[in-house]
Image: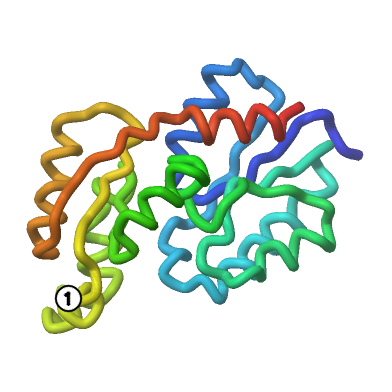
Amino acid sequence: MKNKDILIIGCGAIAHEVSEIIELNNWDNVRLQCLNAELHNTPKILPRNIKEAIDSNINDYSKIFLAYADCGTGGLIDLLLKDYDIERLEGAHCYEFYSGSSVFKELSEKEIGTFYLTDFLVKNFDRLVIEGLGIQKYPSLKEDYFRNYKNVVYLAQKPDNGLQSKARECADYLNLEFSVHFTGLKNLGNQLNEAMK
């Protein structure tokens, strides 16, 4: 028998931010279950993992919401969700739902060769980028992966001088120009508020 609780199945890369929004809104009936953020490096298997999480919880909650964007799956997440009548966050990726579609479009049009960082990616740059993409083992991959990028834009969720310095170090490591755009949690919060209604 389903209870009245709502489940948010989300990406581990945004767990802290989603938890903060849940707490700020005093959503006592909302639970969060996160999948491993490293699944982003293998987007083809991401829908399968999402399906497993949905199937194992669908009979226990009054509603499930997916705190993922498309995340490089080429529409496979949307195709999966049609079978369940479950909604997800708007946008192609977390960069878009953090900044908002119009701001992200402006940033992209300004320089298409932009590598984006979020708070989570800055904190986990070594593990997810340098190690996750094999650059630590094969340093020549850095040039292969990033030769067409021109700059790094750090989409900051919180003002934090330490993270901003670390983000600049990431840009220096990639030999790219650097800038910061503060997103806050407003756009993500608005989407979650709408979904919880």
Q: Nearer the viewer, residue 108 or 76?
A: 108
Q: Residues within 10 Å of mark 1 (few under 14, many from 20)?
A: some
Residue at 20% across / 58% down in the picture?
151
Q: Mark 1 belongs to which amino acid?
A: Lys
Q: Position of residue 45 (x, y in %)?
A: 56, 73
Image quarter hosting the C terminus: top right
Residue at 64% across / 60% down in the picture?
50
Corner quadrant of residue 135: bottom left
Secondary structure under badge 1? helix
Please tell me whether residue 59 is drawn above or below residue 2 in the rendered image.
below
Q: Position of residue 152 (x, y in %)?
A: 22, 55
Q: Position of residue 85 (x, y in %)?
A: 83, 52
Corner quadrant of residue 3: top right
Classify residue 77 as left or right of residue 11. right
Find disc 1 in the rendering and name its residue: 142
Q: How is the image coloured?
A: rainbow
Residue at 70% across / 43% down in the picture?
65
Say how many tags the image has: 1
Classify residue 140 as left or right of residue 50. left
Image quarter hosting the N terminus: top right
Please tell me whether residue 158 is drawn above or below residue 78 in the rendered image.
above
Please tell me whether residue 13 is drawn above or below residue 160 in the rendered image.
below
Q: Position of residue 39 (x, y in %)?
A: 47, 65
Classify residue 148 as left or right of residue 15. left
